[in-house]
Image: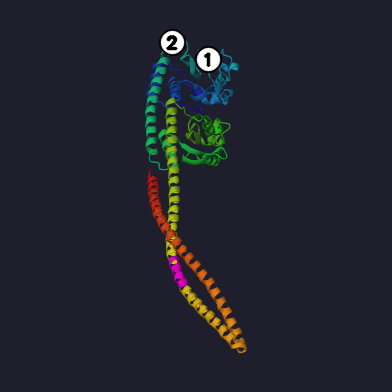
Amino acid sequence: MWRRTANSASNATLPEQMPRDVEAVEAVIDRLDRGISNELHGHQLIIESLVRELGIGYGAVWLPAEDSAFHRRGEYGPLVTGVGSGPGGQVDRITPDDGFGGEAIRTRRTLVLDATSDPRTCLRWGGAQSAGATSGCLLPLVEDGRVTALYEYYSVGQLPFVGGRQGKWDSLARLMSHARKSALARTSLQENLDDRVAVTTVVAELGAASDQQGALRIALDTVREAFGWAYGSYWALDEQAHVLRFQQESGSAGEEFRKVTLAASFAEGVGVSGRAWRNRDLFFVQDIGEMTDCVRAPAAQRAGVKSGVCFPLIVGGRVIGTMDFFVTETIELSDSRASALRNVQQLVSQRVDVLRRTEESADNARELLDTVARLREAADDAGRVAESAVSQASTMTTEVEALDEASAAVGEVIRIISGIADQTNLLALNATIEAARAGELGKGFAVVASEVKDLARETANATQRVSDQIAGIQASSKAVASGIHTTGEIIGQLDVVQARIGEVLEEQARMASAFERQP
């Protein structure tokens, strides 16, 4: 096999005298039967095998891309270096208006080149001639009315696909096409099976996740390993800045690519992640190095990172982040693989949604437990205050009763004093009468008797006032005692209510604890 070797045009061998067409096709079919990875790989094997088996100087395959042009996706043979060193080597895409290749695509007909073909019409043919080629052939593969590939051959001798052998090669080409499609069908079937196994693996692994971060880690590792990616990363949405920021990674694609990844952020619609975010759907890029708005593109080119895919995680109708995966080779994303990755996207999103709601419920349960604990403490405090109030009320009742007894004793003393005052007043009256009888001799005694009588009267009045006040104190004491007794009964009722509140709080605490323990 030749692939970008340094051989010169003189090393290209001429076709053998006896045609080896059938043997060459058998070699192609044998190689295809051993398995291909995708459609591109099948075309590459055909070109490589024919170039080697038939001694052709140069062979290349061109496939259509999203820009509607055909891109060179593989080249083989001893003339690779010579063709690539000229102006034609710089041509890596062909449109229907470009040179002989464009003409073959446009007309959907095989185009044979020889010495009469003007090299000024086509840079590719001019470069092949400069490398020593004397003949060329451009074979468009037409399927369902459209060109699906373009085969390009150059040789230092006559190619086997033209002249008298062309009819045979038309039949052989159909055999190779059938073999390629069969190999591709087997690959597709195997890929379908592998994808189902991969999705099942992701489901099983995600089921073991107990929190969001763990689920994201498991998803990154499992998807990367199950689908054969080299590197994966998760980008969380910063809602305030409205950008995606790096959060987790899995695997490796080189230290430089990793450093750029860790420092990057993506706005909506920018880069691989930004496009998946904007589209709210899977986004695939065949070569990230060709993305002009991706900060990781230059590092990807230097690190050899090629194809990548990204899908958004959607929870509650909103994009919360994206997951992207890359490989160090150029691949094609089949419909089966895209469908499987979309299934993974939904599974991861659903699992993260469930875990997020579970974590929120657990947080709410913890907050409820904290609230219940505080309420329980407050209830206990209220109970202690109520007990203290009952005790204080009992003490106050005792003191009021003592005050009532003291008031009664004071009242008794007042009655005694009042009696003495009455007796004193009576004695003063008698003294006054006796002083009047005594005439002049009793005048001084009369004055004293009068003073005593006045004092007795004032004492009687004061005693009456004190007696009235004591009666008021006794009445108030009885009212206070009655109120304290009533308050004690109410506090006793509050104790019952407090106990019921405590029971309810205990029940809430048990319920919150049970809810928090739920997986």
Quadrant of the image for the N terminus? Answer: top left
Discs 2, 1 touching: Cβ within 8 Å: no
Relative to 182, say whether 471 is above or below. below
* Residue 511 at x, y percent in the picture: 38, 47
Quadrant of the image for the C terminus? Answer: top left
In this view, the residue in front, 54 or 312, is 312
- What colouring method underlies this structural image? rainbow
Taking the image as drawn, is residue 415 in sight?
yes
Taking the image as drawn, is residue 140 in sight?
no
* Residue 55 at x, y percent in the picture: 45, 21
Q: Earlier in the sequence, mark 2 or mark 1?
A: 1
Residue 402 lies in the magenta-colored region = yes
| Closer to viewer: mark 2 or mark 1 | 1
Q: For mark 2, does the 10 Å Cα neighbourhood hold few (<14), some (14 to 19), or many (20 or more) residues?
A: few
In this view, the residue in front, 118 or 376, is 376
Q: Secondary structure at mark 1?
A: helix
- Total marks shown come to 2
Q: Amino acid at mark 1?
A: Ala
Residue that numbered label 1 is attached to: 104
Residue that numbered label 2 is attached to: 167
Q: Which residues are magenta?
A: 396-408
In this view, the residue in front, 93 or 263, is 263
In this view, the residue in front, 53 or 239, is 239
Q: Secondary structure at mark 2?
A: helix
The residue sitting at 39% across, 45% down in the picture is 515
